[in-house]
Amino acid sequence: MAQPADALVVGGGVIGLAAGYRLAERGAAVVLVDSGRRGASWAAAGMLAPVSEAAFGEDELTRLNLAAVPAFRALAAELADRTGLPVGLRTEGTLAVAFNADDRVALDRLTDFRTGLGLRTERLTGQAARALEPYLAAGVRGGVLAADDLSVDNRRYLATLRAAAEAAGVRFVAAEVSGLLQDRAGAVTGVRTATGEELRAGTVVLCGGASTAALLPVPVQPVKGQILRLAVPAQLRSAGEVLTHTVRGLVRGSEIYLVPRADGEVVVGATSEQQGHDTGVTAGGVYELLRNAYELLPISSEFAFVEACAGSRPGTPDNGPILGRVGDGLVVATGHYRNGILLSALTADAVAALVAGEPAAAVWRPFGPDRFAGDRTGSSAQPAVPA
Ligand code: FAD
Ligand code: GLY
């Protein structure tokens, strides 16, 4: 029988990969088990946007998202150092724009809330917004620049994390985990795969994204997001980049974002739907995204259509992640909903601390697995490990 690993990570999305890398880099013997089904991390847009994702009533989550930015920058620099691979970090910030007068009122309310939290925002007239992004529609009613938001090419980031994890000694296993192994005292000692194999470890770290609730009763629900990848044709790019900032628009009340990459790709997202674990692409979803993109950036109709896909965001009742120890031998890190790429580095540091028997940083305190006590969607004060 193989020697038990120090840590066994379930899930090879951005959370599992970052956690696996960090654990191995700190000297742990790590096994990472992944089903091979691509999750939300592959679909994502890659915005690292604590300012333009800050929503009413989510002050603690905004604090967590803000803390995630320096952690992400540090990890990106570390990965570049170790692998020589780029992650495509962009630092131009987010330009939020409003399409009509009602959208302008909604954007102003959100901006008041965000500045009230101390976030750095700069209000712009329509003309000033178009000076930053000359291809914006002539009718755009003004905007708000969030200069501190970043973005990353999520797929390059995943590839770089995987390369760094392999180099740090993480052993990858392709398998579906079907259950947890426990000893007589209830401590988790490993996992069982769908083919009946048993893998033992000192600590199991559950990072299964929207599927985590199949292994542990946590209130994580899939929130489907359809998203497009377009490409700016070479002849348009010859005069310079068509888009430099992430542009987020309110178009007649619906939200849309366009995220540029240095290689000419533009990611257009995203729908938000309660459809269970379905990740099918629909004509209606693609139509809505293309229509809103065209309204904000008419030149987007000349872009090449590269891909439409969908992913399941791991949503929670309060939109915050779930991170903590759940009994002996088990740590959970899931529920990152709209901000898992952003939160990945900070989560990895927290997981490494928890596996080492230390507390996670104080900013994580509001996001423990025990906070759903009494909630209809959370079954108990501490999710019980299924026997
Ligand atoms: P996933 O990426 O879903 O990975 C889970 C992995 O676990 C999968 O590989 C799966 O195969 C594996 N797995 C699950 N169960 C098992 C099992 N039983 N056995 C073995 N393997 C298992 N976040 C941002 O920060 N910025 C953005 O701009 C952004 N945009 C988004 C746009 C869209 C359309 C979507 C859908 C999400 C977006 N997000 C964004 C959110 C972000 O993608 C998620 O929060 C994040 O990817 C969650 O990562 P994860 O590793 O927990 O889950
Ligand atoms: N954070 C962007 C999204 O989830 O669509």
Image (cartoon, rainbow, N blue to C red):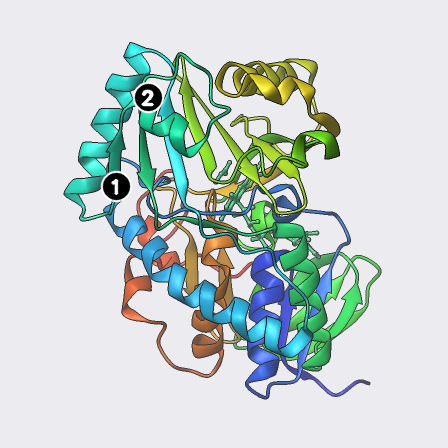
Q: How far across and how far down the image is residue 314, in percent?
A: 52, 44
For label 1, count other residues whose C-alpha is less than 10 Å away and answer few (under 14), some (14-19) or many (20+): many
Q: Nearer the viewer, residue 21 or 193?
A: 21
Does the CB distance between marks 1 and 2 fall below 8 Å?
Answer: no
Q: Nearer the viewer, residue 384 or 175?
A: 175
Q: Residue at x 39, y 48 (%)?
A: 149
Quadrant of image for the C terminus: bottom right
Q: Residue at x 36, y 39 (%)?
A: 52
Q: How far across and how far down the image is residue 334, in percent?
A: 50, 54
Q: Residue at x 53, y 21 (%)?
A: 297
Q: Which mark is residue 126?
A: 2
Q: How far across and how far down the image is residue 303, in percent?
A: 69, 25
Q: Residue furthest left?
A: 116
The answer to whether residue 188 shows anywhere in this view is no
Q: Nearer the viewer, residue 206 or 88?
A: 88
Q: How far across and how far down the image is residue 319, in percent?
A: 39, 42
| Secondary structure of the residue carrying numbered label 2 | helix
Disc 2 residue type (three-letter) = Gly
| Secondary structure of the residue carrying numbered label 1 | loop
Q: Residue at x 34, y 49 (%)?
A: 372
Disc 1 marks which residue?
Answer: 121
